[in-house]
Image: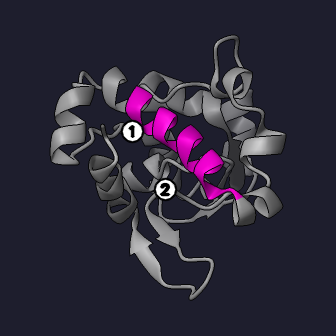
Amino acid sequence: AAAKIICESGGITAFTGAGISVESGIPDFRSEGGLWSRYDPAIYCDYDRFQTEPELFWRMARTLIMETHQNQGGDIHKALETGEFLSAKPNSAHVALTDLQNLGLLRAVVTQNIDGLHQLAGTRKVIEVHGNCVTCTCTCCNAELPVSEALSQWVVFAA
């Protein structure tokens, strides 16, 4: 019944959140033990606070990237020495959405996720509600840099 509705719809839009990327090794934010149980988003993700205390956000971001790296089988100490962090790969759910798009059934994906896995799976029309973790933008001069630039700074402060 669902397949028939999708086929006859003229095109659907998928809305995704953290749950779609858990299978890829990205920690869930809201579950017990998730990021929000350790980092209050009202503090760590508040833009006004970020402007005065950016280290709070980066502390949380560092935890997320390190946990993802470990979930991919990476060694934290080696990553801090080299500045090379393993990232997640798209899973079957990401690929299924791309397949739907290639069949002309999916118009777009609207996601809360910042992981870029929909694009890595090949989905062309992705609307990222919260941005992504591919680039960083300087809040003073608006320069846009690859996130690897921020990660390389962690190597300097690894000790």
Nearer to us in this view, 77 or 144: 77
The amino acid sitting under disc 2 is Cys
**Image quarter (top left, top right, bottom left or bottom right) of the N terminus:** top right
Answer above or below: position of 91 versus 15. Answer: above
In the image, residue 86 lies in the stretch drawn in magenta: no
Residue at mark 1: 90
The C terminus - image quarter: top left
The disc placed on residue 120 is none
Q: Secondary structure at mark 1?
A: loop
Q: Residues within 10 Å of mark 1 (few under 14, many from 20)?
A: many
Q: From the viewer's perspective, is 25 left or right of 105?
A: left
Q: Nearer the viewer, residue 94 or 27?
A: 27
First to last magenta residue range: 53-67
Q: Residue furthest top?
A: 32
Q: Nearer the viewer, mark 1 or mark 2?
A: 2
Q: Secondary structure at mark 2?
A: loop
- On screen, residue 35 versus residue 100, left or right, reads right
Occupied quadrant, residue 141: bottom right
- Which residue is at a point 64% across and 13% down the rendered structure image? 33
Q: Position of residue 92 (x, y in %)?
A: 42, 30
* Residue 11: image location, x then y, percent: 69, 57
Badge 2: how crowded within 10 Å, few (<14), some, or many (20+)? some
Mark 1 or 2 closer to N-term?
1
Residue at x 49% of width, y 56% of height? 133
Q: Indicate the quadrant where residue 126 lies.
A: bottom right
- Can residue 91 be spotted in the picture? no
The chief SS type of the magenta part is: helix
Q: Are marks 1 and 2 in contact (CB under 8 Å)?
A: no
Residue at image coords 73%, 49%: 45
Image location (x, y in percent) of residue 40? 77, 33
Q: Amino acid at mark 1?
A: Pro
Q: Which mark is residue 133?
A: 2
